[in-house]
Image: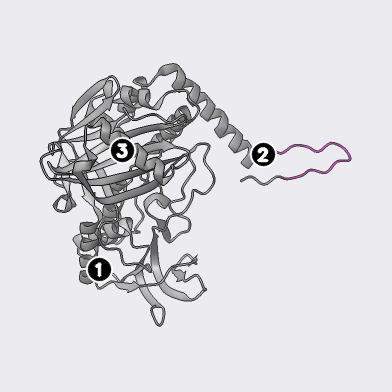
Amino acid sequence: MNPSPIDVDLALVGGGGAASLVLAALDRHDLTGLRVAVVDPVHKRGQDRTWAFWGAPGGDVDPLLTASWSRVDVVTPAGRRVLSLDPLRYAMLRSAPVYDRAAAAERRLGAARIGAPAGTLHDDGHRVTVYDPAGRVLVRAGWVLDSRPRPPERPGRTTWLQHFRGWWLAADRPTFDPDRAVLMDFRTPQPVRGVSFGYVLPVDDRYALVEYTEFSPAQLTDAGYDAALRGYAALLGLDLTALRVRELENGIIPMTDGPFLPRPSPRVVRLGTAGGATRPSTGFTFAAMLRQADQIARALAAGQAPVPAPAYPRRHRWLDAVALRALDRGHVGGVEFFARLFDRNPPERVLRFLDGATSPAEELAVMRSSPLLPMTGAVLGDAVDRLRVRLRRDPTPTVPEAGSRAAGQAGS
């Protein structure tokens, strides 16, 4: 632990993926005069996660990529569709090169690393004091970027999870097609409430990540994930007795219309899922984190506040809430919803929509491709729920009857 608190311009609380991307962006913009501290009891290294995302080739992380594909498959029980993503591409990035890049950036920036857990943050409007859980001061900073996981500010009207398990499979002979990834394969048995799919991300013809994913309200048991993966491997025609599981990946990502507060106080900015970077309808997070890291570095380089733009337009958050409600209440089946999305729109439009980068006209086209009556019911239900929440939080004042006493009610 740091023997005495230090004073810096910028403190990163949490040292995972979001903070690593910020460090790399600060280094890329040559902010060596900035006093930076990283507060985290764990110094992230090695392979502990895999990110998949789409975008145009030539980005800052391209040298770090494990693999990328210009064509992907979407598979349903009705058949297989091969999508050409040009001018975009789907990419896979493992965590080790990201953490290595962040460590190199720390050294060049001269950042201080404080190997202690952060507790409360006190923002007086001029500087932020970071305390440890025992109440000792760790660091004082002009700005704090906080990427620690936390729940939404209040529960959502719909709360699901994206939960998954993947096997990194190695073969002794050519087994996978390295030129094409399987983005979503809906031939998996579907849960009673939710949607499941498998996917395949091949690094080469003998090594691939094969994963089973569910969008649903609750996790499976270990045995449940393993059974689902064995079943999906059988669908792919893979002989598991001839393959080796080199690594295992598990993950849980929130899918909720509950609000995440990206700026809880004047000089504290939240990053990652806690800052709203996770797309509620898909669980994708990495592209938003990458955008926001660059925005933060550009702002600091220009002498401005390191406050990124919202991860997604407000209208997209509303569309996500409607889609989650429709899936959760059974207005539309998950396989049907995603199949129509890809069948009735150009792949580039779908991918940019899922990334929050489409125009309102394109979003109308996406909405028209959804089942009209079920989605209309979800829109109306969402509107009613929003009105109820607003009335609970801001009740209309009433005039008390004679002899009675008016009572106020606090909202959630």
Image: 80 above or below 159: above
Viewed as shown, does residue 176 lie left or right of 155?
left
Q: Nearer the N terminus, badge 1 or badge 2?
A: 1
Q: Nearer the N terminus, badge 3 or badge 2?
A: 3
Q: Amino acid at mark 3?
A: Arg
Return the x and y of residue 371 as percentages of the image width and height: 40, 19
Q: Is residue 395 visible?
A: yes
Q: Which residues are magenta?
A: 394-408
Q: Which residue is pictured at 52% across the width and 30% down the height?
A: 382
Q: Amino acid at mark 1?
A: Glu
* Residue on which the image places disc 1: 106
Q: Secondary structure at mark 1?
A: helix
* Residue on which the image places disc 3: 230
The colour scheme is one colour
Q: Amino acid at mark 2?
A: Pro
In this view, the residue farthest toward the left is 173
Q: Nearer the viewer, mark 1 or mark 2?
A: 1
Q: Secondary structure at mark 2?
A: loop
Decide whether residue 349 is among the magenta residues.
no
In this view, the residue farthest toward the front is 241
Please name the predominant secondary structure of the magenta segment in the image: loop
Question: How far, Cα to Cα, is label 3 from label 2?
Answer: 53 Å
Q: Quadrant of residue 345?
A: top left
Q: Of 203 and 41, which appears nearest the observer?
A: 203
Question: How far, Cα to Cα, is label 1 from label 2?
Answer: 50 Å
Alpha-carbon neighbours of circle 3 within 10 Å: few (<14), some, or many (≥20)?
some
